[in-house]
Image (tube, rainbow, N blue to C red):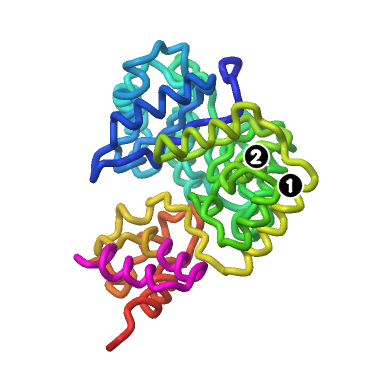
Amino acid sequence: MEKIKKNFGFGCMRLPMKGEEVDIAQTCEMVDAFLEAAFNYFDTAHGYLNTKSETALKACLTSRYERERYILTDKLTNFYFKKQEDIRPFFESQLAACGVDYFDFYLMHAQGEENFAYFKKHRAYETALELKAEGKFRHFGISFHDKAEVLERILSEYPQIEAVQIQFNYADFEDPAIESRKCYEVCLKHKKPVIVMEPVKGGTLANLPEDARSILKEQGGTPAGFALRFAASFEGIMMVLSGMSSIEQMRENIATMRDFKPLSESEHEAVNKVRDIFRSLKLIPCTACRYCVDGCPQGIPIPELFACMNSKQQHGDWNSDYYYNQVLTARGGKASECVKCGSCESACPQHLPIRELLERVAATFEKQE
């Protein structure tokens, strides 16, 4: 882990897009700015951006910079292997897609009670550790979405794990569904460095209601900057990832993290006040990872509909109604078209009751004449 320069990483799940394709020119600009600021950690997975993230990194990073300039993390996802024999060729295809000979970190993706059982059944951990022994990647880790007791069991059973990626932000810190604090404490107990995902909660903590925004404004800095600094202020945090989707977001986050300073006592108090406001809104805690969309037989843009619902909850204006009816669902994919198959819920890292939430969205926006 000696190559890591600073504790801020580029999460490549939300790269800028032009229609269905990654905006290569803007992504190259973002990669250049990131490296020029002396940051060097990049995080991807095969399924990100409908399998376009890895190849975008090949075009924008690995084909343009020497291998020693960057740290690259990829992941093994359950969707891409049915038996143990599938894992090795899939891994090799990931190296080819990214254009590298090895990964710095390779993570068992989205581990939790059910997924861990699937990985164990197919000896995925053992196969990955064989690949590590062969020099195919440098460090072995997991990304995790479940309760702290499950994480405790995984780390006890596989002490070879070198790093743990968890969802960690001030909104989820004491959330009983996410258990950010408890999972973090399990990592500390096992002396595992923590990689933070969703520090800005899918952009939610960057787009605060005005009363919350004014509290942070009094302290100076931006909402996104406060969210990043909160996550990075804790002991044992090796890396804070941000899924940036524009050069403007990249520049703002670089400005925050280039000369990182932990939150002061008064800043912590301000964040606590914002957390209370955030909780009072009872927003849908969707992080827009889009795992739910791939398997939806109706093509419902679930994260966008939830974002629209949250905007309605925060601002209560007509714009959310217009956006829902005239933009998001003008050609179909309304919340009411859900057939209740449940594929979305089985894929959701947040364990949201998506079918029930879609009913609420339909009731809010699809009023009968």
Contact (CB < 8 A) between labels 2 and 1?
yes
Residue 222 in the image, given as x and y percentages of width and height: 59, 45
What mark, if any, has residue 229 been given in the picture?
2
Ranked by sequence position, the earlier of labels 2 and 1 is 2
Identified at 29% across, 60% down, the residue is 296
Front residue (pair 197, 208): 208
Front residue (pair 241, 324): 324
Residue furthest toward the right?
265
Identified at 35% across, 36% down, the residue is 46
Residue 340 in the image, given as x and y percentages of width and height: 34, 71
Which quarter shows the C terminus?
Answer: bottom left
Identified at 47% across, 25% down, the residue is 34
Query: Is residue 326 within the magenta segment?
Result: yes
Q: Which residues are magenta?
A: 306-331
Give the prevailing secondary structure in the magenta stretch. helix
Q: At numbered mark 1, what does the secondary structure look like: helix, strand or loop?
A: helix
Which quarter shows the N terminus?
Answer: top right
Question: Within 10 angstroms of label 2, few (less than 14), some, or many (20 or more) residues?
Answer: many
Instruction: State the separation of the CA atoms marked 2 and 1.
Output: 10 Å
Identified at 56% across, 62% down, the residue is 209
Q: Nearer the viewer, mark 2 or mark 1?
A: 1
Query: Is residue 142 within the magenta segment?
Result: no
Q: Which residue is mark 1?
A: 267
Q: At numbered mark 2, what does the secondary structure look like: helix, strand or loop?
A: helix
